[in-house]
């Protein structure tokens, strides 16, 4: 196994994802299968190959700076309208610090 | 309902045979009637459709130009945000999410007189190849109701195939427009990366995400792309390249065009799909194209590359669904961290969880170089295959999927097998080149098969020219 159940729990913690015990087992199995398949990439020597983070193409020079002008914003009411819990124009969340 | 085209609607409106309002009402009634069978739509938008249609009718009555998409009923994949109109992304988490703004593609469609009739079903956050990952039930293929429509834009493909919408928007990250188009027997286009603004497209994998059209003809798909393409200052990755008149390119003349057929794509494809695609290649030869075999040696590495890059980006993009801003929050959460974890654990479906986990793992300390950086380097090699191929040929043709629409439930328990079915669409996505699926016949069972056409960055003109010439010759 490339990924033990404790490791799966650790990754779930990093991802802020609560997984049930049955899900952990299934996830370990699935991730193992996928990571084994992915090992295929090691057949390739990529020494000196640039990593590609974005699609690259030839393009003319462009004016990427836009004019600095005032624009209407979304507005506070619209911004918090989808919040599960809001108050006084803010998103409300459970307490972060215990006193 | 009559199978309208953009042109036939325009002609009908100008000749006063029908009004845009009548058409909008008819289209929504058609969609509602079909939804019990195909489940293509998650939400209908009768008020918004009627308001847009009445505006078109008013412009026509005043003798004004009603716009390039005047009165055309259009369905929108539910990952593209619409102001005041529920946008679920196929997820329980966003079941009640009502966006406060419109995507740029939506604004442009409505400015051109297009009539948005509803939001279409899709795999949750566009993650899937069968539409079975929707929290709101799978879509059924209108051609064969026991089969999947493909994914992730299955609802958009079905809405066009069943005759409800004349056009639809989908999104494509690794094949999510082309594959459902091929499964449902319609045309689907993934334009060059950056050709259409992603502003308002819910992010899955930002370096791979595209918005693109579905239509029943190449000409209609080209027209819709012409409306939505072009620089948008709200998306820094949207391209400055001018948008040509795609319709003008559809002159049927492909004589002398050099077409490449990648050897790697046909190895082992001894099936009806392979035969139908090769028959389409013969048609292109008869039209005067010069067909030659080319090599795309890094094709076998594309899926592994894609499932590292796409999941890594997804794990970051989906971090925002944490119970703070987007409607859903786990009721039981006592602490902030618990709220994040339980909200996400309850809200995401199995496939999203799998991809978030994989993406988090490949980005985590100690694995970044081995997985993510390695995949980015291999992505360069896959893209280089295209650069080299396009030094020899003007267009590449290939299958879209190794097989036609499969039965619901057939592959749902085997994620790797499902991932492997994306083999023919993923290389184009990684390279960011324009690619599309155009119908090229049906199997003996009557299941549609798609021909994939790929061209150089921003050369949608050649892609449409080849597709249109093939479409005309095969009809």
Image (cartoon, rainbow, N blue to C red):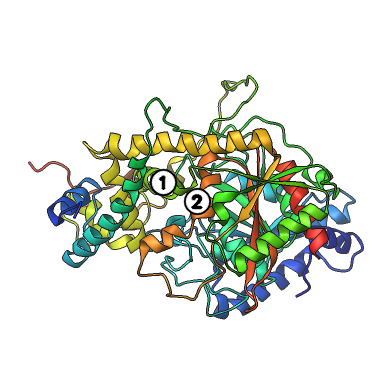
**Residue, disc 1:** B310
Q: Residue at x 45, y 38 (%)?
A: B379
Q: Residue at x 13, y 41 (%)?
A: A97
Q: Are marks 1 and 2 in contact (CB under 8 Å)?
A: yes
Relative image position of residue B444 (x, y in whole percent): 65, 78
Relative image position of residue A54 (x, y in whole percent): 48, 33
In the rendered structure, the residue with mark 1 lies on which chain? B
Residue B2 falls in image quadrant? bottom right
**Residue, disc 2:** B174
> Extreme left residue here?
A99
Q: Is residue B68 rendered to the left or right of residue B200? A: right
Q: Helix, strand or loop at disc 2?
A: loop
In the rendered structure, the residue with mark 2 lies on which chain? B
Question: Can residue B74 be seen in this snapshot?
Answer: no
Q: Nearer the viewer, residue B459 or B203?
A: B459
Q: Residue B365 has which mark?
A: none
Q: Residue at x 35, y 41 (%)?
A: A43
Q: Residue at x 42, y 37 (%)?
A: B378
Q: Earlier in the sequence, mark 1 or mark 2?
A: 2
Question: Can residue B254 be seen in this snapshot?
Answer: yes
Q: Nearer the viewer, residue B182 or B248?
A: B182
Are there few (<14), some (14-19), or many (20+) residues within 10 Å of tag 1?
many
Residue B22 falls in image quadrant? bottom right
Q: Is residue B187 above or below residue B365?
A: below
Q: Is residue B42 above or below residue B248?
A: below
Q: Nearer the viewer, residue B474 or A5?
A: B474
């Amino acid at each position: 196994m490339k990924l033990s159940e404790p490791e799966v729990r650790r990754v779930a913690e990093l991802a802020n994802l609560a997984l049930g015990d049955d899900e952990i087992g299934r996830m370990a199995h699935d991730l193992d299968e996928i990571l084994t398949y992915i090992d295929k990439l090691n057949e390739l020597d990529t020494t000196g190959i640039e990593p590609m983070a974005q699609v690259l193409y030839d393009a003319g020079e462009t004016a990427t700076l836009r004019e600095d002008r005032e624009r209407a914003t979304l507005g506070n009411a619209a911004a918090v309208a989808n919040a599960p819990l809001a108050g006084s124009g803010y998103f409300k969340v459970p307490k972060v610090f215990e006193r | 309902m009559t199978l309208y085209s953009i042109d036939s609607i325009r002609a009908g409106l100008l000749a006063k045979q029908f009004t845009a309002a009548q058409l909008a009402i008819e289209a929504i009634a058609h969609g509602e009637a079909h939804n019990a069978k195909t489940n293509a739509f998650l939400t209908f938008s009768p008020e918004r459709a009627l308001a847009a249609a009445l505006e078109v009718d008013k412009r026509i009555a005043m003798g004004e130009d009603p716009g390039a998409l005047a009165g055309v009923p259009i369905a929108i994949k539910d990952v593209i945000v619409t102001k005041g109109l529920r946008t679920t992304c196929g997820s329980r988490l966003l079941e009640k999410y009502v966006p406060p703004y419109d995507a740029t593609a939506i604004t442009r469609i409505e400015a051109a007189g297009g009539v948005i009739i509803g939001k279409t079903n899709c795999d949750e956050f566009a993650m899937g190849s069968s539409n079975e990952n929707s929290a709101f039930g799978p879509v059924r293929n209108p051609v064969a109701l026991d089969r999947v429509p493909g994914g992730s834009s299955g609802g958009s493909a079905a809405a066009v195939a069943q005759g409800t919408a004349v056009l639809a928007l989908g999104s494509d990250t690794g094949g999510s427009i082309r594959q459902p188009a091929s499964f449902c027997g319609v045309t689907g286009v993934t334009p060059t990366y950056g050709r259409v603004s992603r502003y308002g497209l819910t992010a899955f994998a930002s370096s791979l995400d595209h918005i693109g059209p579905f239509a029943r003809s190449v000409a209609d798909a080209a027209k819709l792309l012409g409306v939505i393409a072009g620089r948008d200052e709200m998306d820094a990755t949207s391209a400055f390249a001018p948008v040509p008149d795609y319709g003008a390119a559809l002159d049927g003349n492909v004589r002398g065009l050099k077409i490449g057929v990648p050897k790697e794509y046909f190895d082992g494809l001894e099936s009806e799909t392979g035969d139908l695609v090769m028959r389409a290649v013969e048609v292109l030869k008869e039209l005067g194209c010069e067909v030659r075999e080319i090599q795309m040696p890094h094709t076998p590495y594309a899926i592994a590359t894609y499932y590292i890059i796409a999941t890594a980006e997804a794990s970051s993009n989906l971090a925002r669904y944490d119970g703070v801003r987007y409607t859903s929050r786990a009721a039981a959460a006592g602490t902030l961290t618990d709220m994040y974890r339980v909200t996400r654990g309850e809200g995401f479906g199995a496939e999203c969880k799998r991809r978030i986990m994989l993406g988090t793992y490949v980005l985590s300390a100690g694995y970044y170089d081995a997985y993510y950086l390695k995949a980015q380097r291999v992505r360069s090699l896959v893209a280089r295959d295209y650069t080299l191929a396009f030094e020899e040929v003007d267009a590449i043709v290939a299958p879209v999927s190794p097989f036609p629409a499969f039965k619901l439930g057939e592959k749902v328990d085997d994620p790797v097998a499902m991932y492997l079915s994306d083999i023919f669409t993923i290389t184009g996505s990684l390279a960011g080149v324009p690619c599309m699926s155009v119908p090229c016949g049906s199997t003996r069972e009557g299941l549609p098969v798609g021909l994939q056409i790929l061209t150089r960055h921003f050369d949608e003109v050649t892609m449409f020219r080849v597709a249109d010439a093939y479409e005309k010759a095969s009809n």
